[in-house]
Image (cartoon, rainbow, N blue to C red):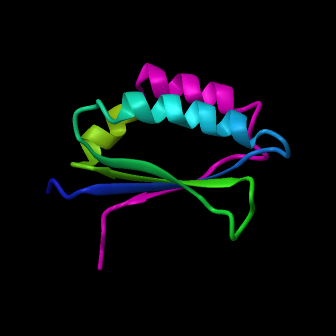
Amino acid sequence: MNANIYTIAVLTAQEGRLDDLKSVLEALAKETRKESGAVEYFFIHDESHNPNTIVSYEKWENSIEEGRHWKTPHLTSAMEQLKDILDGEPIIHRGPKII
């Protein structure tokens, strides 16, 4: 089955590093939106929860395309950069829509 796959990630920057996080995510989004299978790819600044938190929202055509995304140079580079910016590991949720 080629059902859409959704990925939601919660990214919290260290104090004073929110602009750095936004910069990395802006570059990542620019390249990711060019990928085959990327249907939607955007970020939400979750000011109500924590002013240093950004939530990503991704919609992919299928799990194969979403899986390829994790191996792209722009994502692996961003993940490396985020190690020094984030306040802990990102929380990542992945799967098909059920309701």
The residue furthest bottom is: 99
Q: Picture coordinates of residue 49 (x, y %)?
A: 71, 69
Q: Which quadrant holds residue 51?
A: bottom right
User: For this view, does 62 lie left or right of residue 18?
Assistant: left
Q: Quadrant of the C terminus?
A: bottom left
Count the marks.
0
In this rendering, position of residue 66 left or right of residue 12: left
Rendered residue at 69%/70% (across/down) = 48
**Residue 6 is one of the magenta-drawn residues:** no
From the viewer's side, name the closer residue of 24 and 68.
24
Query: Can you say whether 68 is above or below 18 in the image?
Result: above
Q: Residue furthest left?
A: 1
Residue 41 x %, y %: 38, 47
- Residue 66 x/y as whole percent: 33, 42
Q: Residue at x 24, y 56 (%)?
A: 4
Quarter of image, res 69: top left
Q: Is residue 63 left or right of residue 25?
A: left
Say if 67 sits above or below 58 in the image: above
Q: Name the quadrant of the N terminus.
A: bottom left
For residue 30, what is the image quadrant?
top left
Question: Which residue is drawn at the image coordinates 77% and 30% (left, top)?
Answer: 84
Find the magenta span and give its range. Answer: 71-99
Residue 73 is a magenta residue: yes
Above-or-below relation of 56 to 22: below
Percent position of residue 31, x then y? 39, 27
